[in-house]
Image (cartoon, grey):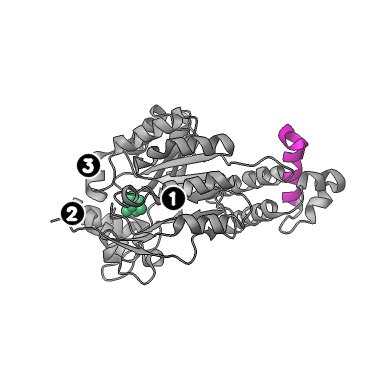
Amino acid sequence: MREAVEFQEYKARRIVNVQRHVDGPWFWCKYSAHPYVGCRSGCEFCYARGGRYLGKRDPATFDTLIQVKTNAVELLRKELGRLDADVIVCGDWQQPAEDRYRLSRGMLEVVLNLGFPLFIVERSPLLTRDLDLLTEINRQTWVGVVLSMSNVDPALKRAFEPRSPGLKRRLLAMQKLAEAGILVGTALMPVLPLVGDDEKHLEDAIRATKEHGGSFVLAGELTMDGVQAERTLAVVRRLGPALEARWRELYNWQVGGKPEYAPPRGYAARLGLLVRELCARHGLMDRMPRYVAPGPLAVNKRIAEKLFLKTYDLELEQAKGYRIWAYRKAAWAVDEWPESIAEIYHTGGEAGLRELPRIGKSLASEIAGWLREEPRFAAG
Ligand code: SF4
């Protein structure tokens, strides 16, 4: 029998999480704010079941006890009022919590009033209830949405996420958003190893995205953490003992031991390359384009975007870690530098760029090349 859901209302002390660095090359967000803790959908693989997200809460209550930050809207208004406008990932349209409390709608009103660009990652099509506000935010600043799904295979959905919103409903939500002129795509997250990571499963999802107006598909591998790992493996066991053995091998998970947090690097690279190829086949991007506000520092954000994208390319090539880190640190430095790097280059040339932290000779030369070759950077 299905257990009843309980809501526990409380007043949170803070709501906005400020990231140290923007999360390129994935969602490009600087801030996040969510009104609920726990989720009624209770997907077996959900990373939020992991202890690190639930704090001291019993992970077994993840889908039966939903904690509600009743002051989410007021807190958001107060905290965002003190921050510089940048992309915020905001809201949570999970049901039945959002039907009852409508906190996400209230949060959108704050985002609109304060002029922040908005990013949303959602499995719930209830999001389109607030299409009026989303359209208005998109008109004033920017909105990007990803509908998340692991695949579009109903049998895998039934096995791993039986209570999450229907796949067709998610795709129809995507179509509505696209028709409203909002940038939308799919997050294949998590891709389910050995059952949902083959070409057919990936291409079916990519094709469905294309057919419903999506512009991009991101794919992320499944991580394994504590209770979530045990529950996910229990589903795999029901699918077949041979499959369980292969999953254990992939995560280097001995019976009685603990799994690796993520599959090996080569696995992620092969998955990323396959998704890239399939996206190209269907005319989609395999990265989400970054929103950049106009202004003198826009050039820094665009150059940082290129550096972040380079880290992803290098991950797919399985390049040495130090090379990836060099680009990542350079991306952070350029992204956060308070003066236009186009100006620095115009006045000081490559030597000027080398004065920036984490920018050595070869990166300065690469950045200078981009500044010279791309007309959009010329104005600074
Ligand atoms: S809908 Fe999303 S947040 Fe809720 S359990 Fe599933 S994956 Fe987790």
Instruction: Assess whether mark 3 and mark 2 are in contact (beta carbons under 8 angstroms).
Output: no
Which residue range is magenta in the image?
Answer: 362-380
Instruction: Assess whether mark 2 and mark 1 are in contact (beta carbons under 8 angstroms).
Output: no
Q: In this view, does 332 lie above or below 54?
A: above
List the single residue furthest toward the left.
1
List the single residue furthest toward the right.
347
State the residue at coordinates (76%, 47%).
340
Residue 371 % position (x, y): 75, 40
Circle nearer the N terminus (2, 3): 3
The span from disc 1 to disc 2 (Cα, nearest Å) is 34 Å
Residue labelled with disc 2? 238
Q: Which is more toward the observer, 375 or 199?
A: 375
User: In the rendered view, does 211 fall on the left or right side of 350?
Assistant: left
Crowding near the residue tagged with mark 3, few <14, some 14–19, many ≥20 C-alpha atoms within 10 Å? few
Residue labelled with disc 1? 91
> Which residue type does callout 3 highlight?
Ala
State the residue at coordinates (22%, 59%).
234
> Which residue type does callout 1 highlight?
Gly
The span from disc 3 to disc 1 (Cα, nearest Å) is 29 Å
Q: Is residue 125 above or below residue 223?
A: above
State the residue at coordinates (35%, 52%).
101
Based on the picture, tell me whether residue 323 belongs to the magenta stretch.
no
User: In the rendered view, does 300 fall on the left or right side of 69?
Assistant: right
